[in-house]
Amino acid sequence: METIKKIFSNKEVLKKIAFTLFIFLIFKVLTKVTMPLIDQEAFGAAFDGNGFLGIANSLSGGALRNYSVVALGISPYITASIIVQLLQMDIVPFLKEWSEEGEIGKKKISRFTRYLAIALAFVQAIAMTFAFNGVNTGLFTDQATTWATFAGRNLWFIIYFYIAVVLTAGTALMIWLADQITLKGIGNGTSMLIVGGIIISFPGTITSLVQYYIADPGQALQSVFSNQGGLSGYILFAVSILMFVLVLVGITYMQISVRKVPIQYANRPGSSKFKGKTDSNIPIKLNTAGVIPVIFASIILSLPLTIVGYVTDASAGTSTAINWLTQIFTYTEPIGFVVYVLLIFIFTFFYSFILVKPEQIAENLNKQNAYIPGVRPGKETEAHITKTLFRVTVVGAFYLAVVASLPIITSIVLGHNYAQIGGTSLLIIVGVALETARQIEADTQEKAYAGFMR
């Protein structure tokens, strides 16, 4: 409550919040600006039952399903950032050098990441349009088809190029909007736009639950609860909302959980005020990897079926192979679910050890004349941190697997998939919300300290 009072009494923080909400409004409007030449109804059918496209659509705020000018969203920039981060690990020498050059190196890496994001957006736009047109023969409008094939000519490459340029420009605009939020708004702009896109879809989720359990006068849903509008319908609706709230609270608690490794600084005899030992700790987050493992696991698991659907037809010769692929790469199937969980564990360990480098931490402790009580500096310290990180990551990977599995479990228990309880969306929202709350608190405290100094 005290923090809320400080927010409303701080004009600078209010301006930042208002600016961020204004950018969200622009983003919302852009998701409704549909791409010319595209048949929206035919295109929307490709999203039915496709997990990979569902994730991509969620991260784009529904812009992908509308095939709007910002259909790619900020995802090419996120992909480029991850690629650049991985390439800095002694894979590309000049990126490794830039990462060690301080602020100048950060600016070079940031510029390189943006160029890579634009290139990825252009390639992704062409590939996506080509793939959707392959699986949906009615993707383009009749006018576009007539113009491209009039008098026996083949001018489809112009249409593909035009769409790719527009979608790439939309991604460039999204990157610019993210930068504006980072500079003038609240929180990290990229993360805030992703969260904004996810939150945009929440009212639709509530509406679907109401239509399923309570009333569906427009008959928007194909199937509804057998006792719709009855007491059991209201109870199940309330249970769905309560489950969502409980999962949200649980995720928040787990996201802020840390394992503190105690460290001590050796005596500093230069001055009497430094005598004795100063206690501190190395905080290792329970979920160090964040939401990246779940996203990677979902994409890798869904990508094979998506590609197969684009390049093959369901003929008798390929039906057996497709059935096997469906069993392996569909996480609602038993085998696919096991593969999904294993991928989450693998990526959690991989990304955690990329972010938390035990060797570097041990080296920094040695340079600062600090040590872990009962552990010798050097290799033993590195081994101790590695062991601790491994144990924490086991718990963190299990937690991510449970959260990622909740939508699958709840859809089976409830008999529908209108309530997305848990999953990638909540992990992203909670993580970004916590970081944003810390920044707002820091901004309000900074203002208070400035007044105290006067």
Image (cartoon, rainbow, N blue to C red):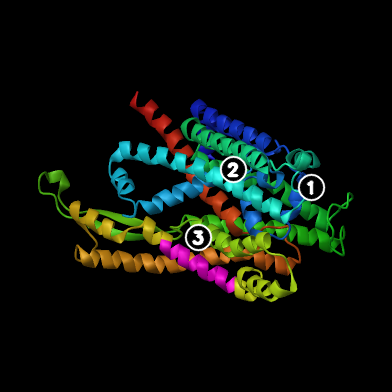
The mark nearer the N terminus, 2 or 3, is: 2
Does dot 1 land on a helix, a strand or a loop? helix
Q: Is residue 220 magenta?
A: no
The mark nearer the N terminus, 3 or 1, is: 1
Q: Position of residue 425 (x, y in %)?
A: 60, 53
Q: Which residue is mark 1?
A: 41
- Three-letter amino acid code at the position of disc 1: Glu
- Three-letter amino acid code at the position of disc 2: Gly
Which residue ends up furthest to the left in the rendered image? 270
What is the C-alpha distance between the residues marked 2 and 1? 21 Å
Q: Quadrant of the rendered structure where residue 4 is?
A: top right
The circle on residue 177 is: none
The mark nearer the N terminus, 2 or 1, is: 1
Q: Which residue is mark 2?
A: 73
The circle on residue 293 is: 3
Q: Is residue 326 above or below residue 262?
A: below
Instruction: Work out whether residue 353 can be spotted.
Output: yes
